[in-house]
Image: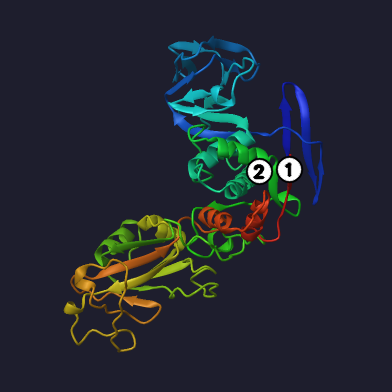
C-alpha cells in the first residue's frame, strides 16, 4: 500500500520505523524526516553535475568513493558502450551517487548540488534508465526538504502564514500517500504535474522553511493512514468530488464551497470556431462527419446532480454530434484537447444578429437572444442566437463562434491554494493553528497528527 512503510537509517543509526498491521498503527518515537526519491529526468544521454562546495561520487552498490571534487568542478556524465563515463573516463559502476561533502558549521542553503544548471538539496543517484536507453537521475533527500522545493514554486513570502502552513501539511501528506507511484522507474515521485511540480532549491524562502518547521511531521490522516491530499490552484467557487476526476470516491474528498473568487485564476474564457473545433476533434481520431451540435447540461449553482457534470459543475462527459455519428469525450479529454485551465465551463454557440435570418430556430422552433458580458467581439455585442439548455447547435452561419466561459484552474479536487489564502486573510484572530481549520474545510473527516 502506498506510503505505508517508512524505514529510516541515517549515519548508521536506525532512527525509527512505522509499521502497519490491519487498520492499526504502531509508531516509534519521533524520527527524522524520512527520505524520498524524486525522479528528475529519464532517458538522458548527457548530465552536467557540479556543486558550490566539495562533493564526491560514490558507487551505490559498495559505498566506494569513485572520485572527490572541489567546489565548482564540472562533471560531464554520459554513457559509452553501456558504461558510465565521467569527463571521458570510464567508471566501473552500475549506479552512482553524487553527494556534497558536509563540512561543519555550514548553512542549509550552501550544501547544494547542481544538476543540469538547477540546484538541489540532498544527493543525486544516476543509473541506466530501466527498459530504455539513456540515464535516469534521482534526487534523494529528506521529505521536508522536498516540501521546501514544492512550496517555493507555488507560494511567495507575501502569502499568509496559516495558508503556507496548511499547504505544507497537504504536500507532505500527498508525498506520503503517493510514495512509490513511480517504483517501476526507480523513484517515488516525479518532478512534473503528474505528481507535484518540483524544481529543487531554486525558489525557497525563509517563510516556507518556518512553515514546514512549525508543522514538522504533521500529516492529514484518515483511518490512521495518510490521505490522497490532492491540491490545485483555484476551484472556481466549489471543489469537486474525487470520483468525478480520479474515478475513485474518497470519503474525505467531497465538494465544498471555495473562497477563491479574488484569484487571478478564478475565471477564464476561450473562443473557437466550429471549424477549428471540428478539426481538432478529427485530428484526435474522432470521426463523426460535419459538426452539427454540442450537448452538455447547463451549469447551475453547485451542488449539481446531473450525469454529465460533477457536483461542482465540472464536465464529466461532453458529446459532439455530427452528421455521421457522435463523439463523447470526458472532461479531461476535452481539457487536454483544447488546452483548457479546467473542466468547469459553459458552452455557448453564438452568431452575430446581422447574420440571422427568419429560418434559424432553436431545438424548440423558437428564437431567442442573450447578452453575454464576456469580451465578445463587436459584431456580436448586440445579441446572440442561442439554443435550448443542453443542446448547442452549429448553424454554419458566417462568423459563428463557440464560447467556453470557464472557472478555476486545475482539477478542483481537495485543497484550493487560493481559497486557503483567502480563508487565512479574512480570518479574525486566526491564531497559530488556524491552518488546521483550513485543512478540515477542504478534507472532510480527517485528523491532523504527527507521522514522524
Q: Which of the marked residues, 1 or 2, is nearer the chain's N terminus?
A: 2
Q: Quadrant of the C terminus?
A: top right
Q: Position of residue 385 (x, y in %)?
A: 27, 79
Q: Tell me how the rendering is colored.
A: rainbow
Q: Nearer the viewer, residue 278 or 310?
A: 310
Q: Nearer the viewer, residue 442 or 56?
A: 442
Mark number displayed over residue 451: 1
Q: Position of residue 72 (x, y in %)?
A: 46, 15
When the figure is inspected, residue 23 is found, relative to residue 10, above or below; the finding is below
Q: Position of residue 118 (x, y in %)?
A: 45, 28
Is residue 187 visible to the viewer in this orientation of the structure?
Answer: no
Q: 10 Å neighbourhood of mark 2: few (<14), some, or many (≥20)?
A: many
Q: Is residue 70 left or right of residue 7?
A: left
Disc 2: which residue: 176
When the figure is inspected, residue 48 is found, relative to residue 402, above or below; the finding is above
Q: CA distance from mark 1 to mark 2?
A: 9 Å
Seen at 61% across and 51% down, the residue is: 229
In the figure, residue 178 lies in which quadrant? top right
Amino acid at each position: 500500500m502506498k506510503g505505508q512503510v517508512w524505514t529510516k537509517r541515517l549515519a548508521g543509526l536506525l532512527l525509527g520505523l512505522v509499521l502497519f498491521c490491519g487498520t492499526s498503527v504502531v509508531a516509534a518515537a519521533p524520527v527524522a524526516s524520512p527520505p524520498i526519491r524524486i525522479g528528475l529526468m529519464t532517458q538522458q544521454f548527457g548530465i552536467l553535475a557540479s556543486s558550490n562546495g566539495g562533493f564526491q561520487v560514490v558507487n551505490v552498490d559498495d559505498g566506494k568513493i569513485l572520485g572527490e571534487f572541489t567546489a565548482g568542478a564540472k562533471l560531464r556524465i554520459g554513457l559509452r558502450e553501456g558504461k558510465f563515463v565521467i569527463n571521458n573516463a570510464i567508471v566501473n559502476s552500475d549506479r552512482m551517487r553524487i553527494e556534497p561533502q558536509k563540512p561543519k558549521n555550514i548553512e542549509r542553503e550552501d550544501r547544494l548540488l547542481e544538476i543540469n544548471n538547477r540546484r538541489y538539496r540532498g544527493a543525486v543517484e544516476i543509473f541506466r534508465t530501466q527498459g530504455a536507453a539513456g540515464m535516469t537521475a534521482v534526487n534523494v533527500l529528506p521529505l521536508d526538504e522536498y516540501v521546501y522545493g514544492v512550496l517555493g514554486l507555488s507560494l511567495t513570502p507575501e502569502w499568509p502564514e496559516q495558508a503556507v502552513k496548511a499547504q505544507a501539511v497537504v504536500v507532505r501528506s500527498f508525498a506520503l500517500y503517493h510514495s512509490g507511484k513511480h517504483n517501476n522507474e526507480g523513484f517515488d515521485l516525479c518532478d512534473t504535474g503528474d505528481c507535484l511540480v518540483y524544481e529543487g532549491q531554486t525558489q525557497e524562502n525563509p517563510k516556507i522553511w518556518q512553515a514546514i518547521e512549525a508543522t514538522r511531521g504533521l500529516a492529514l490522516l484518515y483511518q490512521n493512514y495518510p490521505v490522497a491530499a490532492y491540491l490545485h490552484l483555484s476551484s472556481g467557487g466549489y471543489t469537486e468530488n474525487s470520483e468525478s476526476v480520479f474515478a475513485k470516491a474518497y470519503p474525505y474528498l467531497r465538494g465544498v464551497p471555495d473562497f477563491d473568487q479574488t484569484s487571478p485564476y478564478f475565471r477564464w474564457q476561450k473562443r473557437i470556431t466550429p471549424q477549428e473545433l471540428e478539426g481538432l476533434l478529427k485530428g484526435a481520431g474522432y470521426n463523426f462527419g460535419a459538426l452539427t451540435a454540442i450537448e452538455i447540461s447547463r451549469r447551475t449553482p453547485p451542488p449539481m446532480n446531473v450525469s454529465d457534470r460533477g457536483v461542482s459543475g465540472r464536465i464529466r462527459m461532453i458529446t459532439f454530434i455530427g452528421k455521421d455519428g457522435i463523439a463523447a469525450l470526458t472532461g479531461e479529454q476535452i481539457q487536454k484537447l483544447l488546452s483548457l485551465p479546467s473542466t468547469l465551463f459553459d458552452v455557448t454557440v453564438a452568431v452575430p444578429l446581422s447574420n440571422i435570418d427568419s429560418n434559424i430556430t432553436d431545438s424548440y422552433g423558437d428564437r431567442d437572444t442573450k447578452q453575454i458580458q464576456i469580451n465578445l467581439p463587436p459584431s456580436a455585442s448586440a445579441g446572440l442566437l442561442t439554443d435550448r439548455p443542453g443542446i448547442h447547435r452549429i448553424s454554419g452561419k458566417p462568423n459563428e463562434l463557440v464560447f467556453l466561459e470557464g472557472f478555476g484552474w486545475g482539477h478542483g479536487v481537495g485543497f484550493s491554494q487560493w481559497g486557503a489564502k483567502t480563508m487565512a486573510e479574512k480570518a479574525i484572530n486566526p491564531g497559530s493553528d488556524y491552518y488546521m481549520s483550513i485543512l478540515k474545510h477542504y478534507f472532510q473527516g480527517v485528523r491532523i497528527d504527527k507521522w514522524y
